[in-house]
Amino acid sequence: MAEFYVDTTAQGNGEHIVHFATCESLPPKEARLYLGSIASCGSALKKAAEKFKPVNACPRCAAAFHTA
Ligand SMILES: [Zn+2]
């Protein structure tokens, strides 16, 4: 399990980025939404997509995402 956040501010391409709680590029707390403690990256992206569309995994988290 890992804790995930989604950026509430869309990127230039319209995507809302999903991060691990430990990510270096995690947005400030007023600009992120806590998704919860989630078993996998795929589940975290699905949960984020219930609130925001489209969503994508943070590139800095990506390597870790694949093992989560
Ligand atoms: Zn990240």
Image (tube, rainbow, N blue to C red):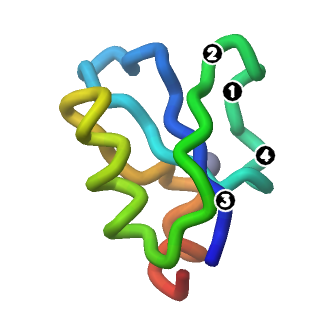
- Looking at the image, residue 44 lies above or below residue 17: below
Tell me if mark 3 has few (under 14), some (14-19) or many (20+) residues whose alpha carbon lies within 10 angstroms of its own: some
Which amino acid, by three-letter code, is at mark 4? Glu
Tell me if mark 4 has few (under 14), some (14-19) or many (20+) residues whose alpha carbon lies within 10 angstroms of its own: few
- Give the residue pinned by disc 1: 27
Closer to the chain start, of discs 2 and 3, is: 3
- Give the residue pinned by disc 2: 31
- Give the residue pinned by disc 4: 24
Which amino acid, by three-letter code, is at mark 2? Ala
Which amino acid, by three-letter code, is at mark 3? Glu
Q: Are marks 2 and 1 in contact (CB under 8 Å)?
A: yes
Task: Estimate the spatial distance between the alpha carbons at disc 3 and disc 4, rounded to whole Å.
Answer: 14 Å
Task: Estimate the spatial distance between the alpha carbons at disc 2 and disc 1, rounded to whole Å.
Answer: 6 Å
Please state which of the two labelled residues, at mark 2 or mark 4, is closer to the viewer. 2
Q: Is residue 10 left or right of residue 28?
A: left
Identity of the residue drawn at 44% across and 38% down: 17
Q: Dot 3: what SS?
A: strand
| Coordinates of residue 30 in the picture (x, y in percent) | 71, 12
Q: Dot 4: what SS?
A: loop
Tell me if mark 2 has few (under 14), some (14-19) or many (20+) residues whose alpha carbon lies within 10 angstroms of its own: few
Task: Estimate the spatial distance between the alpha carbons at disc 3 and disc 1, rounded to whole Å.
Answer: 14 Å
Which residue is at the front of the view, 24 or 31? 31
Task: Estimate the spatial distance between the alpha carbons at disc 2 and disc 3, rounded to whole Å.
Answer: 16 Å
- Give the residue pinned by disc 3: 3
Q: Is residue 26 left or right of residue 49?
A: right
| Coordinates of residue 22 in the picture (x, y in percent) | 79, 55
Identity of the residue drawn at 37% across and 30% down: 16
Disc 1 residue: CB within 8 Å of ligand 1 = no
